[in-house]
Structures are given as structure tokens and as C-alpha cells.
Image (tube, coloured by chain):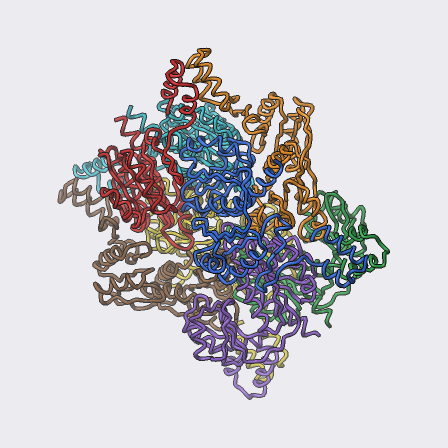
Chain colours: A orange, B cyan, C red, D blue, E yellow, F brown, G green, H purple
Amino acid sequence: MDASGIKKILSDVEKKKISVPAAMAKLRYFPFHDMGFAKVDTQRHLRCGFTEVVFCLGKKVSEVRQIFAGLAANGGNVIATRADKKIYNALKKKFPAVVYHQDARMVTLKKKKIKPTGLVVTASGGTADIPVAEEACITAELMGARVERVYDVGVAGIHRLLAYRECFREANVIIAVAGMEGALPSVIAGLVDKPVIAVPTSVGYGTAFSGIAPLLTMLNSCVAGIVTVNIDNGFGAGYAAGLINKAISDKD
Amino acid sequence: MDASGIKKILSDVEKKKISVPAAMAKLRYFPFHDMGFAKVDTQRHLRCGFTEVVFCLGKKVSEVRQIFAGLAANGGNVIATRADKKIYNALKKKFPAVVYHQDARMVTLKKKKIKPTGLVVTASGGTADIPVAEEACITAELMGARVERVYDVGVAGIHRLLAYRECFREANVIIAVAGMEGALPSVIAGLVDKPVIAVPTSVGYGTAFSGIAPLLTMLNSCVAGIVTVNIDNGFGAGYAAGLINKAISDKD
Amino acid sequence: MDASGIKKILSDVEKKKISVPAAMAKLRYFPFHDMGFAKVDTQRHLRCGFTEVVFCLGKKVSEVRQIFAGLAANGGNVIATRADKKIYNALKKKFPAVVYHQDARMVTLKKKKIKPTGLVVTASGGTADIPVAEEACITAELMGARVERVYDVGVAGIHRLLAYRECFREANVIIAVAGMEGALPSVIAGLVDKPVIAVPTSVGYGTAFSGIAPLLTMLNSCVAGIVTVNIDNGFGAGYAAGLINKAISDKD
Amino acid sequence: MDASGIKKILSDVEKKKISVPAAMAKLRYFPFHDMGFAKVDTQRHLRCGFTEVVFCLGKKVSEVRQIFAGLAANGGNVIATRADKKIYNALKKKFPAVVYHQDARMVTLKKKKIKPTGLVVTASGGTADIPVAEEACITAELMGARVERVYDVGVAGIHRLLAYRECFREANVIIAVAGMEGALPSVIAGLVDKPVIAVPTSVGYGTAFSGIAPLLTMLNSCVAGIVTVNIDNGFGAGYAAGLINKAISDKD
Amino acid sequence: MDASGIKKILSDVEKKKISVPAAMAKLRYFPFHDMGFAKVDTQRHLRCGFTEVVFCLGKKVSEVRQIFAGLAANGGNVIATRADKKIYNALKKKFPAVVYHQDARMVTLKKKKIKPTGLVVTASGGTADIPVAEEACITAELMGARVERVYDVGVAGIHRLLAYRECFREANVIIAVAGMEGALPSVIAGLVDKPVIAVPTSVGYGTAFSGIAPLLTMLNSCVAGIVTVNIDNGFGAGYAAGLINKAISDKD
Amino acid sequence: MDASGIKKILSDVEKKKISVPAAMAKLRYFPFHDMGFAKVDTQRHLRCGFTEVVFCLGKKVSEVRQIFAGLAANGGNVIATRADKKIYNALKKKFPAVVYHQDARMVTLKKKKIKPTGLVVTASGGTADIPVAEEACITAELMGARVERVYDVGVAGIHRLLAYRECFREANVIIAVAGMEGALPSVIAGLVDKPVIAVPTSVGYGTAFSGIAPLLTMLNSCVAGIVTVNIDNGFGAGYAAGLINKAISDKD
Amino acid sequence: MDASGIKKILSDVEKKKISVPAAMAKLRYFPFHDMGFAKVDTQRHLRCGFTEVVFCLGKKVSEVRQIFAGLAANGGNVIATRADKKIYNALKKKFPAVVYHQDARMVTLKKKKIKPTGLVVTASGGTADIPVAEEACITAELMGARVERVYDVGVAGIHRLLAYRECFREANVIIAVAGMEGALPSVIAGLVDKPVIAVPTSVGYGTAFSGIAPLLTMLNSCVAGIVTVNIDNGFGAGYAAGLINKAISDKD
Amino acid sequence: MDASGIKKILSDVEKKKISVPAAMAKLRYFPFHDMGFAKVDTQRHLRCGFTEVVFCLGKKVSEVRQIFAGLAANGGNVIATRADKKIYNALKKKFPAVVYHQDARMVTLKKKKIKPTGLVVTASGGTADIPVAEEACITAELMGARVERVYDVGVAGIHRLLAYRECFREANVIIAVAGMEGALPSVIAGLVDKPVIAVPTSVGYGTAFSGIAPLLTMLNSCVAGIVTVNIDNGFGAGYAAGLINKAISDKD
């Protein structure tokens, strides 16, 4: 409900089309759909440009199913993140069109066709970082981005990375996913003048501290142009990359 | 054993109703019930206004059962927290009236009728925080509070929260339960002049550090009127809220 | 601006006393006073029951002076916390009536008479914890509470604490301030059925970790009824205690 | 030295304009200016779209002065960050045109006129966060962005923030700067569909842990679209915002 | 091999009873029994007053069995700590006389009769701390101490603890075992002038951080006379208590 | 006030020598001396075997002076720890007999002659650990122990340590003080069968983390018989060593 | 592709054997083998003196198998680290010659004969550290080193360690593996003038913090000549030791 | 005192050149020079190949001076690390030949001529890391190494680093010094097959955590061949590099 909505209500009051109490009820609160255990935000698409996502971690299967259904009823595309096989199976029964991305632990339901625009490049340091990278890629794709994947280009063999310099140059935004020492975003940002979204992963052992080591590396990069998200948060990186890529592409 | 109890003993000594050694024995120690592995505090209800609770974490089923029985023998209501199904089943056999609250992992035995007074409002940031919120609600209810639940009103869609402002205004005390970034208590405390008991949950991943992130958020709130309890400590929040609500309501 | 304010605007629109654009301007925003570097919340007193406090940490003296003046202009009592001597001197020039509480690092301006009601008892573990305890006491007093101070009653000599049991029993709410191992709130909460607001202090050395040790002790208390605030946050404890004490006392 | 540079060298070899050894010398290394204690990257402007910045922390005044001079000699705009008064005075002597931004601890030298385009909005939670926010603003401005400042709009009085919703909607990218509990970016990102760069500050005390608390809040935000930089890293946020804003504006 | 042993060798050389090379071989190394994966210290009993203990954590069953046998062959009493049922079964086969202490996860083999002397009192804060407390008690008993157990006397009901003051006064040394906030050792040490060995346990949740909270409480105690061991290290506390108790008792 | 004291009061009541109210007043509280900002525990010497110590950290000079005087009035020996030169000067004026131990930052007042008994050996890893070691030595000496100092015998040159093996063997209890990696207590405890009190110091840099590194080393020692105190807590180690040494020596 | 390779291409261009575009394609990138999910670095052996190792943690069995095959195709020796039984079985099918080192969790394929030279000595503190020590030994052996194992020589019985002094003196480099307090490397480095590579292990409990305690001990050693690797990183230690041993031996 | 020393003593006993007691005195302890507050290890040069170093941190000027003099008396070269100007001045008075290295905070006294052999290359990420790098260089030089310095070659401009590849290839061992994200050692180790000693520095701010960030990066490097020392420990890196370089060079 934006300014024009408020204006409409006020005009209706002025024209006595609606009563003052009715106007108050409309004015005070944004609409949302209350399920008791969850308040589904059916206007988020209007307000924030993208449908709400179901973050499955810690939710019961039955809760995920109901929230997913509530969002699907709005007609937009829907994503469920951190979804295991059991959740997929439960959603599959009700929505045969859902797709399961096993590596990325995501279930997606495409109800609207998406025409990819712009370019998001997602690089991963190692093979073990791919699940997180995939979560980023699929999210960005659902937000309308064309996505290129450049995997296993960590700093151990820097020539592998240098080989993709042209690819990075064409991107609107780059997502760099890495665990262990997490130096990948720094090296990429040192090569090109593009915003780099760094995603630390929990890949590693010992003092990797489940992703703290690469997170600190990324936050402390001596190269400008790097921003960071939570450990293993491929979704967050893909979403932010999607927003930026869309803003740049829409101007074309 | 309070001042009047001591006075009674001293008077009895003065009147030679009891001997000095007998008085000493009575004087020195408060009564409690010794089971060897546990000392059940049968007078805590008198001393602290509420029966002792069985905290099941780390106790054997047999130990829980004996302590629970010892408390139930006093005739008050009894709560077992952090109780799994196995504990419930063991208690059920001996006390068919016990109720199991699966989400909240609590077993309760109501031996005295409770007439709800006042109002405690419990808000949760997300659906995954509900188990902790329920532990708080059930505890407050057993302490005599009327409780309203406002779930899934996190800051991602702040209008969902604003819709409940009136509800928060009527509360004597508010419990705000949230994981991940844990900003819910701050936003609520910014809206109303009520004490807010903040409960961080272990919901989240990566740098949520099993609840440290929301705990720090709550401790550092720039809004006054917020106090905090341990991560996932719904019981502690419900107990403190119950105490405060009772003190306010008793004055009515 | 609450429900009745909105109703008034809508009625005025209906009666055509004001135009739709004028109504929109009024409707959309709550009033506050914009100084550029600070937005002073002149209606917080109405909204939250107490005037806004100036938290001086990190602010320039000139900024503090202007914010303080903005709040004082509303006619309520004003508090500046974490205020050093330099700030006091700057405020003193403009407001000769301000009082400096050196231990508590607070400047207060009482413009309205306060009649103390109820009872807040503030206990400190040691002598070195007194500055934080004083911050709590003065805050609670400005919120209308009668306050009793029980200092240096840490667990090293538990009889000193037991001597004050009656005092704790009369309180509506207890503030327990302690550094080092921070066991004071647990022991007090074990003795009486009152809400205890625990304040860890940065007193100690080595593994006290500037207050983390007592904070953890307080969060992990095995005694119910304890809630906690940030390290050295006497103000926060005093404010929450003030809110609770007022709610209980107002019902008398 | 990009693809066309390499092509040129190869052609020259083919045409025997230069010898093989001479070509090798040119081919192998990118050009930079070696001062012994520092290697000034004079082609970074070409490679990365912006001149290199002097990060003064830990450098001697004499070192800063020489590096600054080396960069200024290239004719672009130059920034020195984390610069104290002493550094400013040293630079002022040699470059009378430098400007000192005291709050932001920056020295800037504008040698090329900048025409502001697009819009970056920088919000701060409190007054004490302004120095970090200013570092971000000035950096973004030197990268060609039009910048609006919205300061002291923390969650304690959420209406102050809501009043600026339209402003946030017009931005290409938003920078949200906050210390203590750091909830500002979450609330802003919940209101608008713009990328939000979150900057935690070291403002606060106790468990704020010099900025760790707001950092964790920002990394764990339940709202999508937020990316984060190091504690107090206004420069990094301004730089990334400048890059994104430029990419969007350039398409206009 | 002590001073007299060296003297003997030197005398033998002087008297030419043994050759120089033979003396060198004897001189250089203390005797131990090499199994390849373990060097069993068969003279530790002489050197340190007590037989070596098998710490089972991280060792294979077959390794534990061989080391245990090596020690048993020396004729002293043997302890295996952190021993699960599988290890007990393996040892039982070879040494039918071994006893399994399930709570304490210990296997003991008494080959020499022990006459208990002195007094070690072991107190536990809660029922869940008993396994660690038992590990301490059994260890102290094998070192010759008479042991009294005072369990479930945490600070939540301080009168339960006060009831045992006489008992604590008779002890040569007190072991205080507690999880969660870990305040027990402080309260005990405040009552009596005896050395108190504090043992933090991993009992608790959330900010108990698997025993860090009580560890910090114990290290920071404001009461003198407390020393601390590792989290859950009942063995270490029992061993140190045994050493001290023995030194005091031996003088009787 | 022990059992005989209570008996006396009860007898007096029985014999009507004192009234019931007078008896109650005597019974309920232990005696202490209330100064408002401090409650001096004048019977601690009786209760705990040693006079109370003034811990100066965080106390004002005037507060220290009054507490010290209160304790000195009882006629026992008095210690002030963490005392800087300013405190010494203030105490010197009132008590010309006080001695200042600059390294150990202690002021002592000997009013009773002490005849050293038993043996406490204090070893330090390096020269920089001496101040903490001295705090331990002086404390133990005031508790009646004969003390030997073995300084700068860290593991870098293990032969320096081995040279003192006989000395360690004669001790009733050993204090081992070390910073940096803190391996000294382990090596000593591996050589002799004596209780070792380990004191980590804040000597070191980087990952020594102001004493956390040696603290962890000491808590995790694979050698039995080691107990630990807080970082830099020489006093605590000296006090505990004094208690143990006295118990052993008193039996002679 | 080293200098001579570049020279060759340039000469070919000069001689018009290849075209400029063809030269560019060759010049710009080092060769590697792209499998999509992994870029196998087939020239690492030439570039870095040793074949690439497959680090299995976080990789799927199918991914490990393909990478291993890619490396084996080059004809050198191949190592897979952190390999469980399932991986071994998968590799065994394709390469019957692979050997599984169960303790060390490694699979090795020797295609070239190795003649051991020099000497690396690997010491372990306890029996439970052997798996990590074995990972180091096998790695060093595959890099051509002669390796001696000295296990279970921790500081609890320092004479066991001293017995091997001659052995340490003969080594080119020493690997010291230890968990718990991790003092072993310090003691060894204090005895001989050899580089010591310290490997902390996750053996221990409580404040060992899964290897943080020994890591800090090793980083803070007061003895010079010690360098450290990640917790449980036997491979890294073995690799570095292999490099150093080879450099020393090659000069023979 | 090595094997031949022992043999000599035994022979002398056999030949009755010395008495048994005299032999015992010689045999039991290695010689060191006892100053009370320090035990100077005058034979470390023989035992460990290098004279002992004075680590000044935490030592008084007078103590440093005496220890330095004790070492100088042996005739070898002497180093004082972490030495401020005051220490230099004190040493200068007694030893006019000492040299002060201000950046590296070292005082050196060369009494024996050193002929540089081999090659140690020391790289630094930034200009601010130079003091730590210099400490490493000077130490390695005093241990006989030829040293090359390659400063300010951090990953922000990776071409600056690539330019020195040949230089790294010639080294026997490389020291890589870096603060902030600390990626330098990884990139270098990915280019050449040389052992790399990584030195994290405390350069940086916020989440650099005074060097923890680069330390973790270095410990978690995905490139093999890297070993790490304590934060800012240039001396330790230089010493280990010196040992390795000497072992390789001595074989020439």
C-alpha cells in the first residue's frame, strides 16, 4: 500500500464512499495472510520486487507446505531454501511442477517465465563449495539474471583463475564462494572493477572454524569493492546479486 | 522458616517446652527432602512463591521420575522442562494426568486450578522460534498469567508487527523470542512502554553461532526497557514474566 | 499520534476541514525534531512513558548539548548517561540546575518533582561495582522509584548478604550488580520470589574478560526469576526496574 | 595492459619492430612504480575504474606523503583514509588543494571535476555513527555518486525511519551504518527492494565487543538483499556503493 | 633412577665393575617399556607416588587393553578413565577382577588393599553433575582417601548447602563440581578455610558453552582458596585432592 | 558465631539472662562492620583462618584506606593486592609500618610475627613472570609458609629446570608461574609427586591473548596433579598454597 | 609454461610459424584440464615439484574418483587425503594398486618408485595422536623422505622423550604432533637445533577446544625454530617437511 | 654437554682423575649462569647452533642489560628483540658497537663476521607490515642467510607479485608477512615449490582482530607447503628460515 493507495482511501472518505472506521481499518495495517504459526506476506512482491522465500531450517514439513502453498497461490515464482528430500517430497505431492536442486538443497516452482538478462558470474574456490555456489546461482536465475559458473578456481593454482578474467569483466556483479582461507574474492576483486559478493563456506576443518576463517578473510580484504554475506548463505548472495544485476539491466 | 518460626522456637525454649539441643536442631537448617542424588526443596513454594521445576537435561529418567514424584506429593502444580518423549512416558505411567507439550518439550501436572490474570504477550520472530516461545507461554500460564501469542512477526515485514501494537500495549510484560539477527525485542520496545523480556534462540546458521548473534543484539539494544535471558531459555523468560505479571495483577 | 489522532484527521477530511494532501502529510509521519545529526523524539514521553535519554558515548560535546537542550525544551526530566566532566561543564553553563553524579557518570535535570513510590533494591557484590550500581539507582529514582542501596554483599561472605533478606523481600524488583564471578544474583534469587535484574560489571582481570565471566554466570543461573542486561549497563537495569516498579505501584 | 596491448606487442614482434627479448620483458609484467617500501599501482585506474587509495593505518607520515604524491602525479583524484591531522598537515604542504574531512578522517584531492549521478542514500543508526557514515559518503561522492544523508534513524524510534521511506525508494543502493545492536539495515531492507550495504560500527560498550555485535546482526539478517563490510569500514561500503551506482547510472 | 642410582653406577665404574660404555647406556635414560604405539612408564609409581592411569579417549580398544595389561603387570592398582562399555568388556575378559563404574565411565583394578585415611568431601551443584563428581570420588578413593559425597546442593537453595557446613569443616580438601553458572565453589570457600578444587561441568545449554561459563565463574571467584581444573575433569580433581589429602594424613 | 555461640545464646534465653527479641537480633546475623560502601568482615579470621585481604582494583584510594584501617584495627596481618604507588603512599601516612613490594604491587602490614614452616616452591618460566610469582610468594609467606624461589626455568632450556628437581621434591606444594605457552607446570608435575598450582600470566603477545594461551595449556595438561588459577592471580595461588602447606605442616 | 615456453611462442611468431591470434591464445593461459566441477592442475608437478593431492573432505565420491583418475593419468604418484572407506572402495575398483592407510585416512597410488633420502622424524605426544602423525609420515614418505616414528613421548614422562635425543639430532626436520596441552614441540625444539613443524591435534576434551589449546601453545612457544600448521593437518606438516628434507638432501 | 662430554667424565672417573662426587656434580646438570632473576644459557650456542636471544617484552631495562652482557661475554653475536629506544640507549653505553634497527625494534651486536649464504626471500603484503618483515630479515641475516626484500606486493594488485616470481624461485625458503586478510602466503606458495613461512601481522582494524584474521587465513591455506608462526613474530620466522637455509646451504 503506497502513497497512491493512501490517496485513494482518503479520496473515498472525502467522497463518503467509505466510512471513517472502514478507512481506519484499511489505513493502519498492511495486508498479510495470518496462518497462526506464520504471517505470509502476500504483498512483498509489490513492496520489495520479489516473492517471499520459504527458509525451511527449523520449520516442520507441514509448516513449510502450508507457507509454500500460501505463496504459490499468489501466482509468482516460489523458492524453498535449506529444503531436504522430505520437504521436496511433501511439496511434490501438491505441486507436481516443483523442481528439486539437490546440491543446492532448494525447491523451486516457476509459475512465470523468466527471460535472463545481464550477467552474474559465480566463482567457487573448490569443488566442495559447489552446493553453496549453486544456491546462489539458482536464486539469481529466478530473479532474472543470466548466470555463468566458474568452479574450482581457488588460489592454489592462480592461473586457473586468470584464465577467466574476460568472463569476470563482462559480469554486472560477481559472486565469489570459498571456504578454508577464502582468498578468492580478494584476487578476483584485484583483477576487475566489478562489485564482488563474497560468500564464505563452512568447507574446511580445524581453524577454519566452520567458516569463520574465510569470513574474516573476506571482511578484511585489502581490495575495495568486496561485500560479504553470512557463512554458507548462497541464497543471500544470489538475491543481492539479482537485485543489482536487475537494476543495471533494466536501464538497458 | 521465617522470623515468626524462629520466634516460636525461642519462646518454646523460654517456656521450656523444648530443650536447647532440640531447638538447635530446628534452628540451624531449613527443611528439605534428601534423596541422595537430589535434595528436593519442599518449602520453595512458601519461600519463593512457586513450586520447584524439574530441569531434565542431563538427568536419568529414573532420577526425573523420583524428583517429580517428590514434588507432586506436596500438592502443587509441577513442571518438567527439556523433557523428551521417554520422560513423558515414564511420568505418564505414575501420573496419568500429566500433559505433554511436544513443541515446548514440557510435561505439566496441574493439581490446583489456575485462574488466569493480567496479560503476558509472547511474540516470535519466525515460525522456527515457536518451540521456545511455547515453553515461555506454558510456564507463564502455570504461574497464573493470561497469555497471548503473536507469532512470526519478525522485522523482515515490519508491518506484520505494527499490526499488533494495540495488543502489546495491553500487556503487563512482553516476551520477545527471536533467532538469527534477533532485532524483534528492539522494535517492540521502541513502540510501547512495557518491560520486554528478550529470548534469543538457536535458530539460524553460520554466524548465528547457535544463538550468540541474537543474544548480542538483545544485550546491545539501543532501546531501554529490555532484559535478556539465556539462549533458548523460554522457561526463564516465562517464569520472570509470570513473577512480574503476578505482582502487577495482585494489586488490582 | 495514536488512533484518536488518525480518527480526527479522517473526520476532518470527511467534513472537508482539511484537504486530502494536507491529511496525507499529517498521516504519514510521526512528529520528531530534526537537527540533521540527530532526530530528537519529542513525543517519546507520550509514546513510551518516559523522556528520551542522551547516551553520550561517541557523541561530541556540542552534539550532546544541543540534544539535551532539545529534550529539556519539552519540560520533562532529562538524563545524560556516560557523561564525563567536560560534558557536565558544557551543560551546566546552559542549565545551571543540572546535577552531576560523578561515580555514575550521569548528568540529570529535574524539571518535574518526583514522588518516590514502590521499592527497588540495588545490591552490589563489591565496592568497585558501585559506579554501575549508582547509574541504576539514579535512573530508577528518576523514573519514580524509591530505591534502597545494599552494597558490598558478595558471596565471599554470604552472611553479609543474608542479613538483608528482609530488605530484599520488601522490594518490587531487585537489581543485582556484580563483576568477577557474578554469583550475587543467583544467591539473591534463591532467597526471595522477586524478579531480579542482573547487571554484570567489567570489574575483574584476566578471565573476567571485561565482564564476560559475570555475564555468562548470570545468563546461566540455575535459579529462575533472573533477567540480564549488558555489561556495565546500570542505566538499562534501572530503566527496566523503574518500568516494573511503576506498573506494580500504580495499581496500589 | 589488456588484450589490445598484448596484440600490439605480438604484432610488433611479427613486424620485427621489437626483438623477442624486448617483447618478453614487456609481456611478462604489468607496469607499476616501485618505491622500495611501496609499489604504486599507476594503472589501477585503467584496470579497476578508480585510482588507488592510500590506507594510512600503520604507515609513517613520510611513506603516506610519497605514495600520495605518486598517485597525484597520475592526474586523477586521490583519497587518503584513516588520516589523522598530522598526515593532513604533511600533505597540505605539498598539495595546498587537499581537503581534510575531520569526522571521516579523510584527505581528498580533487583534480578532476565530478558530476554526481544516480543516488546513494546513507543512513546512520545514531549520532555517534556519523564519522563512519561520512567516510562512506565522501568515498561514494568521489566515485561520482549523488549522496543523501539520513542520520540518527535507529530502531529505538522506528517512525523516524519510516518518514524516509520515499527517500530510500529513490536510491540505487543504500548504505546503512549502525553500532550497538545494528538492526538498522534489516529494517530498511524490509521496506524497500534495493541492495543494502550494511556497515557495523564500533560504537557501543560491553558485549558490543567493538562492533562484533552489530556485525553478527547484519550477517544474520532474516531480510534478503543485505551485504556487509568490515567494522567501521565506511570506505569499503562507499566504494562498493559507488561501483554499483555507477553501473546503474551509466546505463541511463 | 635417583641420585643414589647414579652414585652406584659411578662407583661401579670407579671400581671397574662395569665398563664406560655400559655405564653410559645406564646413565642416559630412565627405564620405560616400549610398545611402539605407547611407552608405558613402569617406574612412575616410584617417581610420582601413584601408578599411571590409562586415559581412553581417542585410543583403540586394543591399545587400551595392552597398556592396561602392561600397567597391571607391575602389581599396583590401575585406573582406566573415559572408558565405555566396550572397553570394560575387553578388559573384563583378561582381568575378571576389574570393576566398572558406569556413571563415572571408569574401570578400576584393585590389586593392593587401600586403607582410607583423611577426608575429601565432594559436593555437586546438581544431579546432572554426578558423573563427573563420581569420577573425582573414585579417583580419590584409589589414592587412599576417605570420601564423603554431598550432591545436589547448588545455590538455587542455599540452605541445602548450609546444612552441610560441619561436613565441609572436617575435610582436608573439598572438591566442588558444578555446571551452568558454577557458583558452588565460591559459596563453599566463603564458609570454610579449606582448599577447594573446583570442577566445571559441561551441564547446561546455550551460553553455558559446554562448560566455559562455570569455568570462568570458578577462575574469577572473589573468594580465596579456590583452584580449578579442566571442564569435566573429575579425574584431575580427584588426583590432586588425593595428593593433598595424603600429604596431610601421612603426617598424622 | 559457631555452634557454641548459638548454644550460649539459647542457654541464656532458657536462663532468662536475655530476652527473646535480644536473642533474635544476635542469632540472625553474623557480625560485620558496615561502612556503607563496604562491609568489612571482621570475623573472617576466625571463620576462615586468615584475615580479609583488600583487593584494590577498581577501588578509590580513600575506600582502600578505610577498609585497610578497619582490618588493621582487628590486630591481624593485612595485605592490599593490586596496589599502586598512590595507594601505598596513602596507607604509609596512617600506618608507617607498611611495606611496599613494588614488583608484586602489594602493601603488607605485619602486626603478628610469623614463623615460617613447611615449604612452598615457586617457579617462574621467565624473568617477565616474576611480578606475578612474587605476589604468590609474599602471600604464602604471610600465611606462614617458608618459600623458595626458582625463577627463569622455562622449557626453552629444560636442563635449567632439571637442576632444581631436588628442590621441588622437598616442597609441600609447588607454584608454577608461566606466560606464553605455559608448559612449565606440566614439566614439573611430570617430575615430582606434589600438588602443582599453575598460574598463567599475561606475558606474551599475539595469540598469547593476554594469558589465555598459557591458561589453556595448564587446564589441558596431560599430567595429573595440576590445578589452575586465574591469569596473573599470584595472590590466589599463594593463598591456596598457604592453606595446603599449613595443613600439612600443622600435623608435624 | 615458463620463460622458455614464452620465448618459443614469440620466436614462432617472429618466424611466422604461428599467427598472432594463435599466439595470444597460447600466451594468456596456463594449461589445465577442465572437468566443470574441477580444474585439474596437470602441470603442478612441473611447477611445484609434486603432484596435486585430492583433498576429499566435502567432495562426492564420484567427484573424487574423476579427479583422482585425471591425476593418475599423468603418471605420477597420487594421494587422496581425508578419504573414508567408501572412497577407498571406489578408487580400488578402478586402480587395484591403491593402498589404504586406515589410521591416516589416506589412499595412495605409487606409480613411480621412491628412494628414501634424508631423515624426517615424527614424534607424537600420545597414542591418540597417531592418526594425524601417520598422515604426516606417509605424505613425507611419498615426497621421498626417510621417516622415523617416535610415538607416545609426551611431557608427562619427559625421560621417554630424552631417550630419543640422538634420533632428533640426526633429522633434517622434525614433525611434533600433540593434542591437549601440546607442549611437545617446545621441549623438542629446546633440545636440538632443527626446524620443528608443530601439528596440534583435536585430541582432548573441554578447554582443549578441539585443538585450539595445543595450537596456541605451539604458536606461543618461547623456543625458536618452531613453525605450526592447522589443527589435525598431518598432510600439511608432512608436505612442508618433505620439501625441506628434499632441499637439504638434494645437495648431498 | 654431549655424549663425548659424558664419556670424558666417565673416563676421568675410571682413571681416577676426578672423584665420584665431582663427577656427579658435572654429570647431573648442564651448565648455565644463574643471575637469580634469569638463568643465562651459555651453552645454547653449542647445543642449538645459535646464541640465545634476549626477548625484552616485560623485562626491566636493568634486567635486559645484565642478560645481554652475560651473553655477549660468550663472544657470539647477540640479538635483543622487542627492544625500545630506552633499552638501546642502556645497551649502547656498555656496548658502543650495538646497532639499533628502529623499524624492527631490535638491537644487534655482531662480534663475529657473518658470510651470507643461500637465499631467504621476505615478502610483505603492505607497507605497514614492514616492521615485522624487517625483524625476520635481520634475524635471518644474523643466522648467516643472504636475504632479499620484496615489499608491498599484496593481492590487491596481483601483477606486482607475479613480477617477482623468478626471485621466489631462487630462494631456499620464503617468508611471507601479511596483515588484514593475509592471502599473500597462499598466492606465493601456489606459484613456487618452496617452503613458505607465513607471518600474520596485527595490521588492520575491526574483524582483523589484531592479527587473528590473517593467522586463520594462513593456517587454513588450501596450498601445501605453508607453515605459520605467531602474530607479529618476525623473529620466529627469521630464525626458522635461518635454520632451514643453513641446512640447505651447508650441503653446498
Foreground of the two, C217 or C15 = C15
- The number of numbered discs placed on residues in the rendered structure image is 0
Q: Is residue D49 left or right of residue E102?
A: right
Residue beneath the point at 55% across and 32% down: D193
Foreground of the two, C160 or D150 = D150
Can residue F161 be seen here?
no
Q: Quadrant of the rendered structure where residue B41 is?
A: top left
Foreground of the two, A66 or E184 = A66
Tell me the quadrant of the picture where the N terminus of chain H can be found. Answer: bottom right
Q: Is residue C232 left or right of residue H236?
A: left
Give the image location of residue B167, x and y in percent: 41, 23
Give the image location of residue B44, x and y in percent: 34, 34
Q: Is residue E148 left or right of residue C144?
A: right
Tell me the quadrant of the picture where the C terminus of chain H can be found. Answer: bottom right
Q: Quadrant of the rendered structure where residue A75 is?
A: top right
Can residue H62 be seen here?
yes
Give the image location of residue E123, x and y in percent: 41, 47
Give the image location of residue G173, x and y in percent: 65, 66
